[in-house]
């Protein structure tokens, strides 16, 4: 029953505090994604769990046993780290089978496991080649196959799909999901990619500046993120600054907006709305008028950049209405789809509030 | 007027043909992406147009004049690579003004151009900072305007977003496109990321194994892919092996399916449909019964994997919380959304991207 608990983890490099009191649990067979931007501390966190870094304070438990001071090889983990090199003097096949050979499995069984995993990452025809004969992306896939072949029930993956061709990454993404459920792995997967997180995770741990910002299921992370940073980082949101009128209405730029959920705040607040929830409709309330500034055809959907009083509102729809640059449009924000946050909790410097 | 024309261009490295008889035209002020998986020859092609590599065969014309043999510095081009490659010992303003100074422009002129450029990408307040003090996204914006500050009319981009966090990359791609349109540049942008290509290109040139397989607007490529490879690489598609059983009728998975095309006499038929074009509906025709094998929540939409007899179809839609794993469902495949390809001897080989 490999469950993991991280309790009050702190880690600094010199005067730079990378992890500030990080706590969470991962259940047996759970796929947890640790999501955050570059430099938020997510890889450091994973290395502390793997035992590759000593922690300053706090503890790491596996199945209720304190492993904080145990060496990495005592933790019985499979891990994949970015830039974690293949053995250059071994072929792809030998690399992938390395941990199995070390454990003394018989050759036939090793070959079978290696073949399966090479096929998953699409490298079957490269098994006899040396790492230097492979492209960077192929080396990364070989390293991933090596982790999968360890047959460890507990996997730590640090950006395993980063820097791969996006199509290959999306194929391997669904493979990872299928395999983890099939074999009952417990996984902690680190990534800056929110789409990857939504697809793979049972739960998403969002990290910002070394602090756990929110922990929610994949569905809740998207539909009702606890924080405005969550609404910004997971998926996309339009943010509006408004003033609370009563429990279910706010005033924005002199316009009345109804909000279905209980606002529970006073004074100025931050509203958030997903681009795909905004409709090209006019209603008595919750409606803005703007002018289309750009149209981007994205395949499944079309995205519109709409200028509202000098700032941009983003709308995305699968209906592909024939609207063009310069058209005046009305934008309806359905009350059910408006999220509300305290104004003190600004999502980040790069975010525009309209 | 920097229009670009390639006539039967090939490039061989020893015994490998990286680019194989490629011809196309890029109009003045057009934003074109070269899209394909790693190793398809797109970067080699870009480097030949920029003059960093010499073609083994064929001709490259800029403004109607052959530029083969002309050094890159005489081609009036800007180049932006994957890694920002700013000079680490110069501050942001010095980096941006470098090209202008080297060409012997007056200091006052250089200062003016540098300021304009930095204001253009909202980096004016960072002018005095060193590159290492900037985030990845900011460094890439600085590198972009350094390329533009040379007064170039043609801009070459080689995977400029691929080393950035996805969130920042998406923002930057729209900024780059906006800047290019505002300044009236001709752009050739190399990427493996189909969503980057779809969102910002006037036209996409899709490549496979050194050859152009389709060139067209994002809408043409997405809605009318020339072959299964294109339908697979750009967006997602379900592929079904099919046999003709009438002039507008195919047999798929034991069902008869009506299509737009006349399919009589076709061999090696493959039908394809986008996941978002399949509807949960029962109609008189084109309806399959299946069982929901899994449901993946992806944020704006959910993906339902539905098992028919021999085929598994992926269906993507928003707002169907009523459909759950294990349920029996009807799928309607509208004839107008079914794509039909013929003479596909080996579908697996055709779809190979890794």
Image: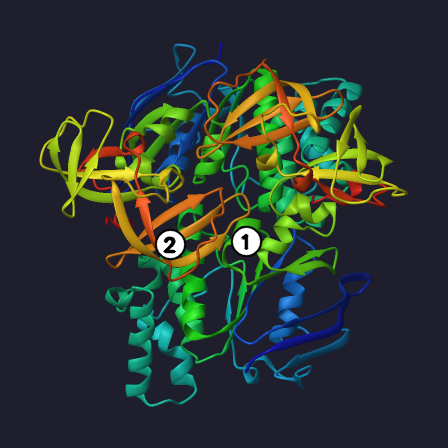
Query: What residue lies at 62% left-to-right and 26% top-to-bottom?
Result: A148
Image quarter of residue B232: top right
Q: Is residue A174 left or right of residue A219?
A: right
Q: Secondary structure at mark 1?
A: helix
- Measured as percent of width and height from the top left, residue B153 is found at 49, 78
Disc 1: host chain = B
User: Label 1 neighbourhood size at 10 Å, few (<14), some (14-19), many (20+)?
Assistant: many
Find residue B162 and name its label: none
Residues packed near mark 2 inside 10 Å, few (<14), some (14 to 19) or many (20 plus): many
Q: Is residue B190 left or right of residue A209?
A: right
Identify the residue position indicated by label 2 in the image. A305
Q: Helix, strand or loop at disc 2? A: strand
Provide residue A33's location: percent of width, then percent of height.
44, 29
Q: Quadrant of residue A47?
A: top left
Q: Which residue is identified by label 1?
A: B198
Q: Is residue B228 above or below residue A290?
A: above
Above or below, B151 relative to B166: below
| Above or below, comparing residue B112 to residue A29 in the picture | below
In this picture, residue B49 sits left or right of residue A23: right
């Amino acid at each position: 029953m490999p469950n993991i608990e991280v309790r009050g983890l702190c880690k600094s490099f010199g005067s730079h505090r990378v992890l500030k009191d990080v706590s969470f649990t991962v259940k047996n067979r759970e796929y947890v994604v640790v999501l955050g931007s570059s430099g938020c501390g997510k890889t450091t966190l994973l290395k502390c769990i793997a035992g590759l870094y000593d922690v300053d304070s706090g503890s790491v438990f596996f199945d209720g046993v304190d492993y904080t001071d145990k060496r990495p090889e005592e933790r019985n983990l499979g891990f994949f780290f970015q830039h974690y090199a293949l053995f250059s003097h071994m072929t792809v096949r030998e690399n992938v089978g390395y941990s199995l050979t070390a454990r003394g499995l018989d050759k036939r069984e090793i070959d079978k496991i290696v073949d399966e995993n090479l096929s998953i990452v699409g490298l079957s025809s490269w098994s006899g080649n040396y790492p230097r004969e492979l492209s960077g992306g192929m080396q990364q896939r070989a390293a991933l196959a090596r982790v999968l072949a360890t047959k460890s029930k507990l996997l730590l993956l640090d950006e395993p799909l980063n820097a791969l061709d996006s199509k290959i990454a999306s194929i391997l993404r669904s493979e990872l999901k299928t395999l983890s459920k099939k074999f009952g792995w417990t996984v902690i997967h680190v990534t800056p990619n929110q789409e990857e997180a939504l697809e793979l995770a049972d739960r998403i741990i969002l990290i910002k500046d070394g602090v756990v910002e929110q922990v929610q299921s994949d569905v809740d992370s998207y539909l009702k993120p606890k924080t405005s940073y969550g609404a910004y980082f997971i998926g996309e949101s339009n943010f509006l600054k408004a003033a609370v009128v009563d429990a279910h209405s706010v005033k924005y730029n002199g316009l009345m907006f109804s909000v279905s959920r209980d606002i529970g705040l006073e004074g100025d607040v931050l509203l958030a709305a997903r681009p795909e929830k905004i409709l090209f409709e006019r209603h008595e309330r919750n409606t803005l008028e703007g002018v289309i500034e750009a149209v981007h055809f994205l395949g499944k959907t079309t995205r519109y950049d709409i200028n509202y009083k000098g700032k941009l509102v983003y709308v995305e729809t699968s209906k592909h209405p024939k609207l063009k640059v310069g058209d005046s449009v009305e934008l309806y924000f359905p009350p059910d789809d408006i999220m509300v946050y305290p104004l003190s909790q600004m999502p980040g410097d790069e975010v525009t509030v309209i | 007027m920097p229009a670009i024309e390639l006539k039967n261009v090939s490039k061989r490295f020893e015994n490998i043909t990286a680019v194989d008889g490629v011809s196309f035209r890029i109009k003045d002020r057009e934003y074109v992406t070269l899209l394909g998986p790693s190793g398809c020859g797109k970067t080699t092609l870009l480097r030949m147009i920029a003059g960093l590599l010499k073609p083994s065969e064929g001709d490259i014309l800029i403004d109607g004049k052959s530029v083969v043999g002309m050094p890159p510095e005489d081609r009036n081009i800007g180049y932006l690579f994957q890694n920002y490659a700013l000079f680490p010992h110069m501050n942001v303003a010095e980096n941006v003004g470098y090209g202008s100074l080297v060409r012997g422009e007056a200091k006052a002129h250089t200062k003016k151009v540098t300021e304009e450029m930095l204001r253009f990408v909202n980096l004016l307040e960072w002018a005095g900072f060193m590159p290492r003090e900037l985030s990845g996204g900011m460094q890439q914006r600085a590198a972009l305007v350094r390329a533009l500050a040379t007064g170039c009319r043609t801009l070459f981009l080689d995977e400029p977003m691929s080393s950035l966090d996805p969130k920042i990359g998406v923002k930057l791609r729209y900024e780059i496109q906006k800047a290019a349109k505002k300044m009236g540049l001709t752009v050739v942008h190399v990427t493996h990321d189909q969503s980057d290509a779809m969102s910002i290109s006037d036209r996409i040139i899709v490549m496979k194994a050194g050859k152009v397989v389709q060139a067209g607007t994002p809408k043409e490529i997405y809605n009318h892919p020339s072959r299964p490879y294109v339908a697979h690489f750009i967006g997602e598609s379900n592929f079904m092996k099919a046999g003709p059983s009438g002039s507008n009728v195919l047999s798929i998975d034991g069902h008869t399916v009506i299509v737009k095309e006349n399919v009589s006499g076709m061999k090696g038929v493959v039908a394809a449909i986008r996941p978002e074009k399949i509807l949960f509906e029962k109609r008189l025709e084109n309806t399959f019964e299946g069982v929901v094998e899994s449901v993946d929540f992806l944020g704006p939409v959910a993906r339902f994997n539905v098992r028919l007899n021999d085929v598994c179809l992926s269906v993507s839609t928003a707002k169907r919380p009523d459909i759950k794993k294990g349920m029996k469902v009807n799928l309607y495949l509208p004839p107008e959304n079914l794509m039909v390809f013929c003479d596909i001897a080996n579908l697996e080989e055709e779809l190979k991207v890794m």
